[in-house]
Image (tube, grey):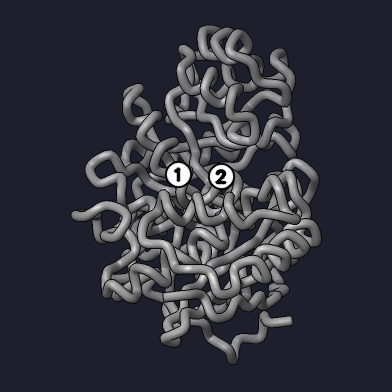
Amino acid sequence: MKIADVTLKRYSIDTTSPIRTSTGEKWKRDGMIIIIRSQDGATGLGEIAPLDGYSRESLSEAQSCASVLADNFLNVDIPESLQEISSLLNQHSSGCDPIPSSVRFGFETALADLISRRLELPLCDWLLPDCVRTVPVNALMTGNGLRVIEKVNELVLSGYTCLKVKVGSNDPVIDVKRIADVRKAAGDKARIRLDANRLWNLDQATKFLREISQYRIEYIEEPLEHPTVESYETLFDSSGVAIAIDEAIQDIDLWTNLISCHGVEAAVIKPTISGGLAASPGLMEKVVSLGKKVVVSSMFETGVGLAACLHIAATLGENIQPCGFDTIRYLTENLIDIDLNSHGGFIDVPGSSGLGVNLDYDSGGWV
């Protein structure tokens, strides 16, 4: 069976709250949905949505590459395995080499969705049989003072066991107070994670982590603007707060060194920036083999990208940790026909074939 058509459909969606990255706040999420159709009319969906401040490629660069690949894929035989999908992209990348991570993720997801739909299997079962059917989620905390306390109480009562707090963009005194409020409200019923988005030097990070170490922090993501094995080990030894790596995946040699070092407890895997769908299982296996935590996370994608990340996370089985999927509520449109918001600290993995989602063509987010 061959590929008959590849369509790229742009979207631009307002956010309900600003998305904070190392380059500032974003009030819109822009990207593309890729639709691959086979000769028998079957379809597969993927999402290409690089995010400024995380991704190396811009959306315009991703779109140019995706358009080239779309032309190259016409009348190509549909692959049968994840390895064959990756090889197919490499073989047909003429005019777009190297393929940006977000583009690879989109095309690999669409092909995997197409294949698993035709096999009448949920995507996670096609990737690895006997996956989990619900994925735990960490709640992303915003706001200050009484609002935070009320929100934490509400989340813990509804079943959330893990909370994530962004730090670094405010006065450190404000951040420390917010963390204290979160811990006081949560008690021992929830883990607390922090994310600094590489905003500090070693001295700033050390001072801050020493101040908040009393609040029993599970880990802090990417605290240093220029991370090294030596600086992370020094930071951990001086503060006692464990570290998680995230953006470091952009440099695979650095990532490999950091995940092995003393003080690093977890790796956050965002398939959009970590090399795509096919690369994710190997990265997750490496982390688990070292006895460390894997936390799969989305990048504020719509329902298509989030569904793909859910299926990837589901393959972790008993090693699954609360994932970074409390993101779709930041978008005013999700572009799909089902609800993937977290409820009570969990999201159900779509159980129908493929990704288990279809496009909502009546959505107001299409361009």
Query: What mark, if any, has residue 94 been given in the picture?
Result: none
Percent coordinates x, y for residue 291 in the rendering = 32, 24
Q: Position of residue 61 (x, y in %)?
A: 79, 57
User: Please, what secondary structure does the residue beneath circle 2 have?
Assistant: loop
Q: Residue at x 42, y 72 (%)?
A: 114
- Mark 2 or 1, nearer chain start: 2
Residue 234 visible in the displayed image: yes
Q: Which residue is mark 2?
A: 275
Q: Residue at x 36, y 61 (%)?
A: 80
**As drawn, is 111 to the left or to the right of 128?**
right
**In front: 117, or 26?**
117
Number of callouts in the render? 2
Q: Quadrant of residue 31?
A: bottom right
Q: Measured from the top left, where is residue 95 in percent x and y?
A: 75, 56
Q: Quadrant of the N terminus?
A: bottom left
Pick whichever, 362 or 239, lies toward us. Answer: 362
